[in-house]
Amino acid sequence: MYRMRKISRWIGGVLAGVVALGLSVGLVQAEDKMKVHRLTEKDLADFKTGDGAGKLAGYIKTPSMTAGFARFEKGSMTLRNWPYWYEEVVYITRGKGKITRSDAPFISSESHEVKPGDLFYIPKGSKITFEAVSDEPFELLYITHPDPGVE
């Protein structure tokens, strides 16, 4: 657990400058065209699931990846037990949150407090809960690699 967190912080530290630079100008390449994306309030749309709610701004969708931002507000927005049928990398950009992960057969779980600069990987087959723990909105950048055939 400690080693995973240490590696995550090291990777986060190394990538923080690169990612921060990319986020500050919103530089993301999709397919063969380059398009600049900048997170704005108007791009964030409410989403609700049976077990949660939040805001989502999906900017990139290709056959091999999707990317965007998600935001959760303390007390009013949480995503609970979201099933991952795909892989995802998450980079925390704002606020503090609690991430809880469980794997099949979903008997036990592990939780981590995360903050800006933290980077982590969610493997396919996990169930994840995202929860804001700070008064500031909990915001993250997600990059997914969907399963072939899943839209």
Image: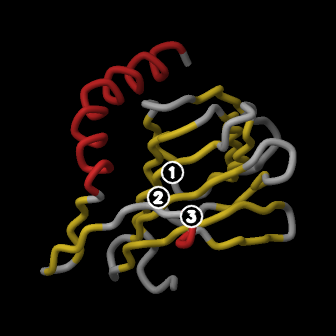
Q: Secondary structure at mark 3?
A: helix
Q: Nearer the viewer, residue 67 or 6?
A: 67
- Identity, as a three-letter code, of the amino acid under mark 3: Glu
Earlier-in-chain disc, 3 versus 1: 3
Q: Secondary structure at mark 2?
A: strand
Residue 23 badge: none
Residue tagged 1? 123
- Identity, as a three-letter code, of the amino acid under mark 2: Glu
Assess whether mark 2 and mark 1 are in contact (beta carbons under 8 angstroms): yes
Residue tagged 3? 41
How many C-alpha atoms fall within 10 Å of the one at disc 2: few (<14), some, or many (≥20)?
some
Assess whether mark 2 and mark 3 are in contact (beta carbons under 8 angstroms): no
Left or right position of 40 against 45 = left
Based on the displayed image, in which of its 4 quarters is residue 37 positioned? Answer: bottom left
Based on the displayed image, in which of its 4 quarters is residue 99 positioned? Answer: top right
Residue tagged 2? 87
Q: Nearer the viewer, residue 100 or 118?
A: 118
